[in-house]
């Protein structure tokens, strides 16, 4: 298992190494794309600020009933609530209106190209608008400002009418509304409605157009909300609140980013002060409205008590009666205070809410206790009952009057203090460095992306175009011995160009470059054939391949040459009568006068054989293209030719057509002594080679061996990496079979 795993890892590594050029191309493309994106990305700056939400100031009440009244109207600040308020449409809408952030004035450019050209210009066309007033239903329409000679400009109407215009009103498209200079206050009428425009500055060539628009308010608010960040600073730990709000706003213009954030805080502070001041003002108005009524009741109770004492004389109250009087007065004061609180709560909460229900329960409890005190009073003598009742009314109204006065003073103090409970700790300042794009991170991301994409392309290519790249797979899976593995030869590329160009002379690697590594591999093939053909009665060899462009003509010509160089008499036969091209390897002018003429009886084969520059090597070209090449191969003439040639030559090598497209190779294979299959490294799936083997065996022909051709060196330990090469042999017009 460990050995197989090691082999698999080696295979993966070698596959990636062979595809290193594709990986480098992928990395280069992704890096170029990343650099282009960085170049085209607009720098974004961030302005930061900090707010402090101070806890409410509690003022000590002189009366227990109103001890927490200030807290009732100024509850402790909740950071999350304040964050939502800061990001609300109320605050952001006021910010948009204060800074004219819904006003857009941009130059008209060509798509894509215009933006690219603008990005390379130091100073492009620019316009600044001071005032632009339009009706609300004109928002979203695109007006135009066109620069004219002499520093003037034209103001034009939109090219489409408003969606909700006045019925029956005319809205001319692209109409001239007015002309003027920067600083002029222009007025115009479009569709019967008044428009106002004042341009502060204009810098553009004559003819340059600008789009002028008041965006829908909600769209401008949404854009600000998307670029605004607010969080409670230092509140990461559980159950910890700091009441410090960290605000950040991002914008391409650093100065404008600071202005927008400062304006947001300004609008928030103003709204916060107005809200709290309004709540307390409502409470003060309610208490001040009740104060005269309580004062009148107090005066009336005092008058009744004084009148009764004057009529009956002074009556002293016993201690029990005095305690009942004090308790009854206290209960009456508490009940009155709770009723006032209930009335105030009903301004914010509905009947049946938790707070109102709690107040009602407290009032019911106190009223029940007050009824008990009243029952005790009723058991006293008549004069004492009257004195106690009148004294209780005076005491209760006195305490209530005093409490209301104190509450009014406390709420006035609270109003002055709570209006300023939020303060700015750090005002926003323009950012010095852009926070986006993060160039180093983007470069790293695109580098990793390039590597990942490159690996994916290499592995995908290997999976989709998986061919046999290891000759041992052929031996192990198909049982076909591999006689030789032929590596790539740079010298052969020059020979192939000469063959494709039709240059005269012999263009055979084994003849012109005997020291080349590929030539040495062909000599190894010659040695293997010597062992296999030693016991055969005929030394005839068929060289074929699964499909065209695998290098079989290269193998057959060079095999014949190295056999001849071993002092043997060799005949090379171009048996591909359809697309034969061996004559070009030897610099012959034409393929005519060859095998097709011999098999059709037009000339004897000995007359068709031609000598070559390679001593001991003769060649029989394919001849003119016949109508039915396969039928000529089945005639007795071909059998006679094979028998006679094998007797006169030590070796006869047949360069046959591909095995899978046509049946010529199978016919020839039945008449020769040894059949060789040329396989190109990395091009043939194993099933394709298996099909060749099955097709030959179905015709009673044994596939004797394979030549593994077209192997490209990986550059990784020639021997340690299992002789893994690829041979790029450019056949061009010469390799047709």
Image: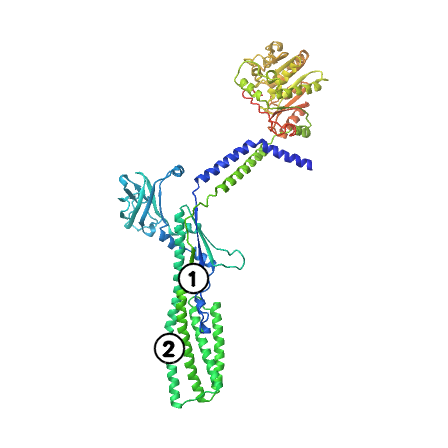
Report the residue marked by disc 1.
421
Task: Report the coloring of the rendering.
Answer: rainbow
- Say whether residue 699 is visible: no
- Residue 482, image x and y in percent? 67, 25
Residue 645's image quarter?
top right
- Residue 124, image x and y in percent? 36, 40
Question: In whole angstroms, how far apart are the C-alphas of marks 1 and 2?
Answer: 34 Å
- Residue 209, image x and y in percent? 33, 41
Give the number of the mark in front: 1 or 2. 1
Query: Relative to residue 552, is residue 174 drawn left or right?
Result: left
Quarter of the image with the C terminus in it: top right
Q: Do the residues under discs 1 and 2 have CB atoms within 8 angstroms?
A: no
First-in-chain label (1 vs 2): 2
Q: Crowding near pointer 1: few (<14 within 10 Å), some, many (20+)?
A: some
Report the residue marked by disc 2.
295
Residue 206's image quarter?
top left
Residue 655 position (above or below residue 216): above
Q: Residue furthest right?
A: 535
The residue under the point 47% across, 67% down is 353
Query: Relative to residue 153, is residue 14 drawn left or right?
Result: right
Pick the residue in front: 190 or 530.
530
Residue 473 position (above or below residue 496): below
How many marks do you count on the picture?
2
Q: Residue furthest bottom?
A: 312
Which of the numbered marks, if any, corresponds to residue 162? none
- Residue 66, image x and y in percent? 44, 72
Query: Relative to residue 138, is residue 731 drawn left or right?
Result: right
Name the element at disc 2: helix
Residue 549 position (above or below residue 78): above
Quarter of the image with the N terminus in it: top right
Q: Crowding near pointer 2: few (<14 within 10 Å), some, many (20+)?
A: some
């Amino acid at each position: 298992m460990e050995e197989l795993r090691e082999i698999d890892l080696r295979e993966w590594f070698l596959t990636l190494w062979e595809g290193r050029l594709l990986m480098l191309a992928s990395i280069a493309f992704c890096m170029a794309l990343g650099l282009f994106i960085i170049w085209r990305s607009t720098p974004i700056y961030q302005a930061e600020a900090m707010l402090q939400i101070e806890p409410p100031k509690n003022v000590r009440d002189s009366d227990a009933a109103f001890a927490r009244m200030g807290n009732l109207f100024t509850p402790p600040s909740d950071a999350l609530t304040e964050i939502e308020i800061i990001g609300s449409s109320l605050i952001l809408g006021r910010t948009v209106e204060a800074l004219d952030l819904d006003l857009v004035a941009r130059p008209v450019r060509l798509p894509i190209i215009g933006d690219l050209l603008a990005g390379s210009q130091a100073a492009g066309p620019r316009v600044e608008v001071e005032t632009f007033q339009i009706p609300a239903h004109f928002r979203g329409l695109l007006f135009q400002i066109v620069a004219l000679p002499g520093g003037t400009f034209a103001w034009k109407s939109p090219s489409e009418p408003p969606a909700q215009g006045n019925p029956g009103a005319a809205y001319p498209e692209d109409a001239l509304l007015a002309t003027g200079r920067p600083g002029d206050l222009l007025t115009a009428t479009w569709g019967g409605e008044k428009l106002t425009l004042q341009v502060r500055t204009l810098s553009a060539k004559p003819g340059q157009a600008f789009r002028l628009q008041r965006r829908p308010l909600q769209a401008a608010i949404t854009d600000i909300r998307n670029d605004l960040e607010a969080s409670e600073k230092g509140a990461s730990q559980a159950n910890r609140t700091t009441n410090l709000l960290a605000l950040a706003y991002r914008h391409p213009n650093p100065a404008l980013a600071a202005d927008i954030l400062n304006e947001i805080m300004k609008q928030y502070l103003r709204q916060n002060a107005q809200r709290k001041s309004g709540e307390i003002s409502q409470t003060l108005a309610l208490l001040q409205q009740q104060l005269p009524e309580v004062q009148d009741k107090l005066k009336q109770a005092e008058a009744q008590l004084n009148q009764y004492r004057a009529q009956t004389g002074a009556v002293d109250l016993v201690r029990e009666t005095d305690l009942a009087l004090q308790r009854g007065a206290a209960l009456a004061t508490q009940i009155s205070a709770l009723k006032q609180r209930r009335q105030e709560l009903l301004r914010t909460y509905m009947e049946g809410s938790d707070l109102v229900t709690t107040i009602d329960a407290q009032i019911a409890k106190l009223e029940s206790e007050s009824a008990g005190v009243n029952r005790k009073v009723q058991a006293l003598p008549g004069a004492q009952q009257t004195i106690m009742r009148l004294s209780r009314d005076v005491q209760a109204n006195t305490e209530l009057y005093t409490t209301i006065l104190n509450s009014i003073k406390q709420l006035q103090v609270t109003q002055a203090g709570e209006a300023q409970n939020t303060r700015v700790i750090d005002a926003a300042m323009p950012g010095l460095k852009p926070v986006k794009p993060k160039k180093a991170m983007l470069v790293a991301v695109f580098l990793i992306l390039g590597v990942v994409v490159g690996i994916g392309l290499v592995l995908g290519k290997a999976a989709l175009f998986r061919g046999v790249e290891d000759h041992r797979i052929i031996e192990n899976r198909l049982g076909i011995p591999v006689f030789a593995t032929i590596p790539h030869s740079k010298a052969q590329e020059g020979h192939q160009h000469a063959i494709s160009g039709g240059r005269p002379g012999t263009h055979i690697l084994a003849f012109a470059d005997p020291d080349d590594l590929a030539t040495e591999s062909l000599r190894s093939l010659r040695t293997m054939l010597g062992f296999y053909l030693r016991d055969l009665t005929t030394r005839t060899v068929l060289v074929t391949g699964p499909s065209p462009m695998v290098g079989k003509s290269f193998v057959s010509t060079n095999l014949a040459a190295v056999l001849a160089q071993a002092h043997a008499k060799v005949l090379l036969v171009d048996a591909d009568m359809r697309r034969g091209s061996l004559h070009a390897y030897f610099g012959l002018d034409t393929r005519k006068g060859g095998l097709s003429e011999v098999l059709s009886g037009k000339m004897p084969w000995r007359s068709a054989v031609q000598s070559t520059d390679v001593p001991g090597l003769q060649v029989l070209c394919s001849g003119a293209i016949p109508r039915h090449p396969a039928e000529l191969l089945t005639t007795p003439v071909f059998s006679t030719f094979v028998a006679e040639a094998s007797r006169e030559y030590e070796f006869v090598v047949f360069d046959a057509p591909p095995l899978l497209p046509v049946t010529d190779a199978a016919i020839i294979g039945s008449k020769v002594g040894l059949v060789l299959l040329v396989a190109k490294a990395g091009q043939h799936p194993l099933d394709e080679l298996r099909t060749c083997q099955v097709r030959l065996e179905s015709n009673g022909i044994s596939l004797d061996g394979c030549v593994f051709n077209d192997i490209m060196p990986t550059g990784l330990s020639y021997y340690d990496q299992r002789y893994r090469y690829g041979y790029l042999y450019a056949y061009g017009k010469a390799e047709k079979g």
